[in-house]
Image (cartoon, coloured by chain):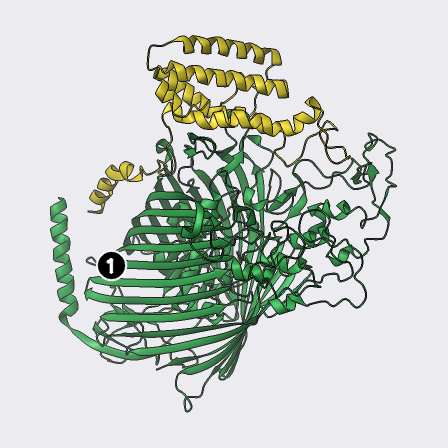
Amino acid sequence: MLLAGGLTLLGGCDKFLDVNTNPNAPQTVSANLYLAPMLHWMVTSPQFDGRFVGRYTQQWTLPTTALTTWDRMGYDPTSDNGGQQWRDVYWTLGQNLVDMNTKAEAEQRWDLFGVGLILKAWGWQATTDLHGEIIVKEAIDQTKFSFSYDSQEYAYQEVQRLLKLAIEQLAKTDGAVDQAYLAKTDKI
Amino acid sequence: MKTRVAIMSVMGMFLLAAQAIAQQKTVTGKVTDENVSPVAGVSVVIRGTTTGTYTNDAGNYSIRVAAGQVLQYRFIGTLPVERTVGADNVINVQLRRTATNLDAVVVTALGQTTAQRSLGTSQQSVIGADIAQTQRENFVNSLQGRVAGVEVVSTSGVPGASSSITIRGVSSISSSNQPLMIIDGLPMDNKTLNSNVLASDAPGSQTAFNNRGVDFTNRAADLNPEDIESLVVLKGPEASALYGIDAANGAIVITTKRGKAGTGGLDYSNSFRIESTRARPELQRTYSPSAAGNSTFQYFGAPYPSGTAFFDNIDGFFQTALTQKHNLSFSGAATDNRINYRVAGASTKQNGVVPGSQLNKINLTGASQAQVLPWLRADLSMGYTYASNDQSFKGDGGPLIGLLVWPQTDDAKAYLTPAGIRRRLFLSAVSEVDNPYFNVEKNKINSRNNHIIANFGLVLTPFSWGNLRTNIGTDSYTQQNLLLRHPESAFASSFNGVIDQANDITRNINAQTLLNFNSRALTKTLSISGLVGNQISDNKSTVDALKGQDFLDPNFVSVNNTNLRTNRTTIAQRRLIGMFGSATLDYRKFLYLTATGRNDFTSTIPKDKNSFFYPSLSASFIFSDAFPAVGRIMTGKLRAAYAEVGKDARPYAYRPALEFKTSANGGYGYGFTGPNLELKPEFARSYEIGTELSFLDDRLGIDATVYRKQTKDQIVNDIRGSYATGFILFNLNGAVTRNQGLELTVRGTPVRRSSFSWDMLANFESARGKVLALPNNLPESYVSDTWLFGNIRNGTAPGLSTRSLTGTFYVRNTQGALLIDPTTGLPIRSTTFIDAGYDRQPDYTIGLSNTFRFNRVSLNFLLDIRKGGDVFNATEQYLTARGLSLRTMDRNTPRVIDGVLRDGKENTATPTVNSIVVVPSIQTSYYSNISEELFIEKDINWLRLRDVTVNYVVPERILANASVFLTGTDLFLFSNYSGLDPIVNGNSAAVGGSGAAGIDYGNFPIPRGLNFGIRMGF
């Protein structure tokens, strides 16, 4: 009897245990829904970092006369100051942009795919402008925990390649190109 | 074949039943102890059946039994006695209480009872009366010092504060280290609500609590201590292996009371308590506030003019708190002993020393056992608890910090202006810390909880070779939380008030079935017993949370009164199936070998790896029985055990979900935590070796255990990865931690006379937890909630203790001299979090309890002694940075800090010795930029009188069955800690890993209390 009970249980076990799909939020969404937050931070992030960059590129002065850590070729420890662009490209865009582009390409949404490629190109461009050598080839890989940096030259080449590809996509009118779909969250 | 077996077993049942009814008669008798006093609650069972009864308060019992059958008399902590029923209708029995006797009856894993001698693992029991006698609302707090290896950390001293409990130290870096709680055979939820389910704590929110400053009760505290019959602590995975993955940190097995008396009985007890706060910090009264900076009050101003009047804001703030508790229980058993019952109710009204803090609790429990058929016994128990708890905020911006920094020249009691709004002195609404009176009056944390535990159990004995025990039960509660940050409060004035509501609906369903095989002789000297079983658990919690900001009417407490509302739902579900078996070989009652195996299937690990098996093996050898020559002078047992135990991840850990982004125009994006589809269960391997010895006719007993546990592939939650992965945090396997330690329990009865006796019990523990590796060779892992003050957190790294602290401590040159900044003359702090050898793990702890009985009076006290372990006094650092601490009194003294300048030559043979003079009163960064390091107090020891009880049994001629008692809790504390109380938690029991225990920031100390009351039986 117990054995029989046990066997029935085992049969239903897989189904019984299959409750690990997060009910609080989706694990994947329609491609266009990834876009808005990325655009938001594309505009906002440079301003955040500008607070520190501007002291040097725009000759901003600080109200205090003390040297800041930045003036001494340092950074603000235990703070996110000056890290926003980095965070933007690798996290806000990061896997979201990969997922969006993959979906858009698969669904032949060439317009969205084009926008995605431009975002990717913008990310590398803006980040290498600020940080010099950056991680491009190995970026967005969750199986790795240490990464090789690429030269600035390579980053710019990649930007050019991505932009060319983007222009090709944006020129297409076939497939699932749909202005309304794209405009849903594309406020630019 | 199967049908035939079924028919045969059904026929067997009838035969058995028929036989049992055959020649029954009623046997009565009295059970007494060695002092010939009656013993109530002794279980009297017909051997091989589940038919039985208990003795009543007069020690009498009555049972229907057939001649030739054997009656077993069992009582926890005594030798079991067996008597064969003969011609006599009266069987009187004398039980012997024992200190360490190997034949004492003990409860083990899965609620089984066995003789102490057969146990190859380490466990320790506490009787319910000892727990109830401490008069603590949260029974967890009564365990410190009573069991070797158990450490209890209460979050603070306000009513309803959560308490975390760890057995054998901290082994998990980021997950819970608390043991599994079992009540009457089924798991009990001991969750402390994590603030991360609040709408205020949604990702990206500006109003997050991060478990800092807020606390909710740990739910096991809903249990009424008066309902506990006994509690057993299964210390390691060896003892708790059968409970599976949730018991990787040990288990606490609670048995609740059942009706015992042969006749109905009514018991009433009460307790009244007066509490007062123990300590207050000293503050300077020389220098006046300076409005320097825009943060809270700073005291770097001119000296107060002579004759300045000061107000004693602190003393006036704390109140003398009164608590009253009433317990009423009604229990008994039917005359034919087929049914027993116990119904009990309790009401607790506890006020805290902090104004406005309180806990109101109502407990209702009912339990009944019935011998439905000779082969079927039913056990139904239900418990309902209502608890309403008001706590004050703590930590940053909590009332204690406000109380300390509020100018002493101002009477804080007037916290409102004549117009009825918050009275501020001279800083802005956000900068000026809340007046403490305003804080406790206007800000609120209220939690109301309705908790039901129901447990339905059946024991079937249709066959003579064993029994089938099955339990199904639910542990469900609805916890309604309301957190108010008043619109005028510094907490929330920039949001014009924040109100959070969160309703946690938790329902846990557990079912467990055991098939027990009675001991069966294999040969003349060898016998075997065992069990197989399964367990199914389905735990689900749904938290519906909402937040309102921007109040219209500042004093109307409702979300409906707010302009901006957000909501959030958090569902967490986990299912678990376990199958297990155990077999014990018994060789001549002096050598036992037990093997167990359990396979768990969990929902939280990817499917291909979610089934995992782990074994345990334990042996017990009674060498005093094996070698009778030894047995003449002592009894002794050696035991050894090895166990493996797996542990799963939290729900939804391996695949991230998208978050609704609140940036412009909505949309979805990933959260911080990345995927890990390779996630697998972690495994601990543990062994322990121990001995139990007793001498002098059991008057001296020793129980010693050494253990070592190594956890591999440990899952570390939310550990940092490179941004280049596309994510920031990961849940990764790969940490290795090792825990080892020594536990020693010594029991003694120095005096045992009929009019006077003295029993003592000492529990010693020394434990170490060490991190051997982190996933992917990452340099540090920490739980971010613990980063609650300055730049210090519970960071750990390979080679460090599991309870270490990392921070931006001072940097030193290769010679160990402090590096001094040439521009300021102040020491330079590290720009990264570094280790500086701090460890919150005590060297050892001792719990010493003594009981004296003199005729009608008994005295019992428990001393809690701790040696070593660091505590971070953040409150003192806060006061120093603001010029309030007494250590800032020499602020005008010029000084040169010992060290060398960081001028490029610091690591050469001739570093530049610092000669820069600083005057702290001018250069206040001397205090404000001081490293946390200087406030970590190393090697904190304490001697604490945990509780002391004097009990007096009222003479029968005045009042029958009555006693009065006086109990003091936390009456004194001797410690080298300079703060208020070294038992603190900067977060709450909800935070995993080593948490923020030992980080003391704006925390109310545990008050001292004096209880008195009466117990009466009718």
Query: What chain does mark 1 sit on?
Result: B
For the point 28% across and 56% down, the residue is B518
Q: Chain drawn green, letter?
A: B
For the point 77% across and 46% down, the residue is B926
B846 and B897: which one is in front? B897
Q: Position of residue B728 (x, y in %)?
A: 52, 31
The answer to whether one can see residue B82 in this image is no
Q: Is residue B215 above or below residue B573?
A: below
Pick the quarter of the image with the N terminus of chain B. top left
Q: Is residue A171 above or below residue B786?
A: above
Q: Position of residue B307 (x, y in %)?
A: 79, 68
Q: In the image, what residue type sits under mark 1?
A: Leu
Q: Is residue B779 left or right of residue A170?
A: right
B583 and B894: which one is in front? B894
* Chain A shade: yellow
Q: Position of residue B471 (x, y in %)?
A: 28, 55
The answer to whether one can see residue A34 in this image is yes
Residue at image mark 1: B458
